[in-house]
Amino acid sequence: MVLYTVNPDGNAHYPPCPTVKYTGLYCPGCGSLRGTHALLNGDVATAMRMNPLLVISIPFLGALILVPRWSHLPWLPWFSFTVLVLYGILRNIPVWPFSWLAPG
């Protein structure tokens, strides 16, 4: 309920991302709070600007909930880890087309 009603953008209730604060780099989760707030309020475009991986991953997470045996696939943890690492690297490259992956 709090995330639905209180916008995390510039609000003191939510702490800043420690990765950005101490390194200046965006982690794979940066923008997720703002993106979730936008999704809860029906603003998919803003959620995509904040963290596209969050929005894109929702159908896949839903599929894992609906078909629990898929979560036991041996390659899934490695695939997920690889996607997160690559996404974390690519969103910190300040050149188009990678710059649109940074939280906006």
Image (tube, grey):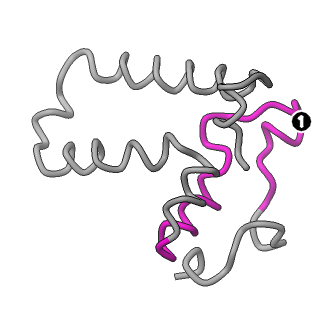
Q: Position of residue 74 (x, y in %)?
A: 21, 17
Q: Amino acid at mark 1?
A: Tyr
- Left or right: 67 with respect to 9? left
Q: Report the span colored magenta.
A: 15-42
Quarter location, residue 98:
top right
Q: Is residue 26 magenta?
A: yes
Q: Is residue 8 above or below residue 20?
A: below
Name the residue: 56% across, 57% down: 47
Name the residue: 36% across, 19% down: 79
Q: Position of residue 72 (x, y in %)?
A: 17, 28
- Left or right: 58 with respect to 104? left
Name the residue: 41% across, 43% down: 56
Quarter location, residue 67:
top left
Q: State how many labels appear.
A: 1
Outermost residue toward the front in this view: 96
Q: Position of residue 94 (x, y in %)?
A: 80, 25
Q: Nearer the viewer, residue 100 or 69?
A: 100
Residue that mark 1 sits on: 22
Q: Nearer the viewer, residue 68 or 34?
A: 34
Name the residue: 52% across, 27% down: 84
Per the image, label 1 sits on a secondary structure element best described as helix
Q: Is residue 62 above or below residue 24?
A: below
Q: Residues within 10 Å of mark 1 (few under 14, many from 20)?
A: few
Q: Is residue 34 magenta?
A: yes
Q: Position of residue 16 (x, y in %)?
A: 81, 54
- Left or right: 8 with respect to 86? right
